[in-house]
Amino acid sequence: MTKRVYNFYAGPATLPLSALEKARDEFLDFAGTGMSVLEISHRTKPWQKVMDDADALIREVMGIPNDYKVLWLSGGASSQFYMVPANLQVPGKPMEYVNTGGWASKAIKEVNRYGEAKVVASSEEENFSYIPADVEFTEGSAYAHITSNNTLYGTEWNYDPKVPSDVPLVCDMSSDINAREIKVKDYGVIYAGAQKNLGPAGVTLVIVREDLVERVPDTVPTMQKWSTHVGKGSMFNTPPVFPIYMCKLALDNIKETGGVKAKEAVNREKAKLLYDVIDASDGFYKGHARADSRSLMNVTFTMATPELEDKCVAGALPLDLVGLKGHRSVGGMRASIYNAMPIEGVKKLAEYLTEFKEKNQ
Ligand code: PMP
């Protein structure tokens, strides 16, 4: 067996071993074709089956209602930052956002090309360490946008914002899609770059309620219209075949291991292991996120000095605990514990952090 470490990188991130093994096993001969999945035309039946299976699996694990379309697009979640306003703009209506930092800020920046961006709440004044409370969006706005989990700061929405019934809620779920059960019908649009909790880099999942697909003005370029891709089953142009194939295999793993409900239960256990170490450390580890805004997926914390943090990151390496350095916007350390991170890895990290504190406080 090849050596595998516990990979805590924020994305691209650890993938289910079963998915990697399956891809390895059929890498040279996919579905009896005598070709790699990297080599076959996307206009063939074996490829169409991958697309159909990926669609069916994501619909099943997320419980996506029939009046929603599923798209697999290239361009990363960042392309949705401009595709959302491009597709959902309505002249004279504001596009409302909550600024929870980093990716949310980047999404907001794109809106002004299409109309007025209105920030209804922000946690910028406290370095995005919390999700603003009691957020309400305004009746008559074009849409309401949130980022369900902020990968950089380790914050996650733990309540549903108030959204008027005529306003579609749009959510960037790049770093917590399938981490916990959600009701898709509460959203107008969901998008997620795959490389954290869904699969490898190179594909972005977009889920759009049917009635919103046709809202797009004619002036929007063809490739930027969701309707273009809906009409062609995500194959208007050559799709990112390998990333979609890997997402399909990773979704097989979710289904086979009890679905999102089972993942959520383990995710809550994993996150608690690390937050408990932080909370019991008498301030040796300082959690960046406020307790009510803590992320299940990205646990962020700092220590007294950058030297101590570097020592902690370096000391984890011989134990095969990899990718723990925090993002520069927070500093310190970040443990990304997506669905594919086994609980054993998190237990090992929690033990290491407890010992490190004892030796270095
Ligand atoms: N949104 C969130 C929440 C992210 O964590 C990221 C980082 N991958 C992005 C958007 C940007 O995604 P991409 O790199 O796929 O454009």
Image: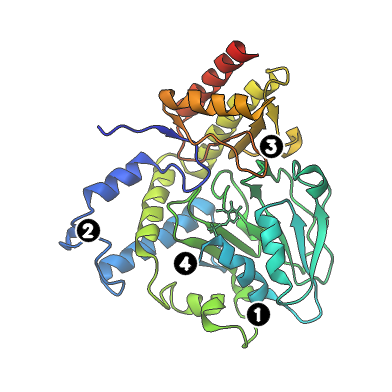
CA separation in Å, label 2 and label 4: 23 Å
Check contact, mark 2 vs mark 4: CB within 8 A: no
CA separation in Å, label 1 and label 4: 21 Å
CA separation in Å, label 1 and label 2: 39 Å
Between marks 1 and 3 in the image, the one whose residue lies nearer the viewer: 3
Residue at which label 2 appears: 30
Examine the image and state in which quarter residue 261 appears: top right
Tell me the element at label 2: helix
**Viewer can see residue 169:** no
Tell me the element at label 1: loop
Three-letter amino acid code of the residue under disc 3: Arg
Three-letter amino acid code of the residue under disc 4: Ser
CA separation in Å, label 1 and label 3: 35 Å
Between marks 1 and 4 in the image, the one whose residue lies nearer the viewer: 4
Residue 265 or residue 132, whichever sits in front: 132
* Label 4: few (<14), some (14–19) or many (≥20) C-alpha neighbours in 10 Å: many
Q: Residue furthest top?
A: 359
Residue 120 or residue 313, whichever sits in front: 313
Q: Label for residue 74?
A: 4
168 with respect to 277 (left or right)? right
Three-letter amino acid code of the residue under disc 1: Arg
CA separation in Å, label 3 and label 2: 42 Å
Residue at which label 1 appears: 215
Which tag, 3 or 2, sits closer to the chain's start? 2
